[in-house]
Image: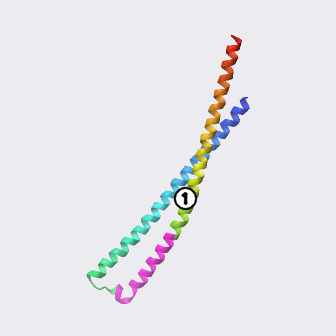
């Protein structure tokens, strides 16, 4: 009997650790996603600032061709960030599914432990009633 309790306790502990790991992984991926979105936002602001600056006056970067190279670099950076973001979102989706499974296993293992303990108490109560 005691071995069953020990096994259930170990199972519940493992399920809890897996759930906590999955939670931290989801948080880490969400944080990385926020960083990528911020980097895309900064690029967008830089492009807007550059466009506003060109409207006010002609500048040397535009006439020398550096502006065209900079715009190509911006598009390259944007494409790389969007690719990384798409891959990260796919990983995050998978991590969230892992988290849902881990939460379910944690819930089931805790319920099994409670049911086991309730069964032991019920047997003890029956034994006491029988003996009295």
Indicate yes or no whether the magenta region holds residue 62.
yes
Residue appearing at x 66%, y 23% in the figure: 122
**Residue 48 falls in image quadrant:** bottom left
Residue appearing at x 69%, y 34% in the figure: 6
- The colour scheme of the drawn protein is rainbow
Indicate yes or no whether the magenta region holds residue 7.
no
Q: What x and y, as percent, mark residue 1?
A: 73, 29
Q: Which SS does the magenta portion mostly show?
A: helix
Q: Identify residue for label 1.
A: 92
Q: What x and y, as percent, mark residue 31?
A: 48, 57
Residue appearing at x 33%, y 74% in the figure: 49
Q: Closest to the observer: 34 or 122?
A: 122
Q: Secondary structure at mark 1?
A: helix
* The residue stretch that appears in magenta: 61-82
**Residue 110 falls in image quadrant:** top right
Q: Is residue 108 above or below residue 30?
A: above
């Amino acid at each position: 009997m005691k071995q069953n309790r020990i096994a259930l306790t170990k199972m519940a502990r493992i399920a809890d650790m897996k759930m906590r790991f999955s939670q931290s992984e989801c948080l880490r991926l969400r944080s990385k996603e926020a960083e990528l979105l911020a980097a895309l936002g900064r690029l967008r602001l830089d492009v807007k600032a550059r466009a506003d600056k060109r409207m006010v006056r002609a500048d040397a970067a535009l006439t020398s061709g550096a502006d065209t190279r900079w715009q190509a670099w911006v598009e390259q950076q944007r494409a790389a960030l969007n690719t990384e973001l798409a891959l990260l979102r796919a990983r995050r989706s998978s991590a969230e599914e892992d988290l849902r499974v881990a939460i379910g296993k944690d819930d089931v293992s805790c319920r099994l432990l409670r049911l086991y303990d309730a069964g032991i108490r019920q047997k003890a109560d029956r034994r006491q009633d029988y003996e009295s």
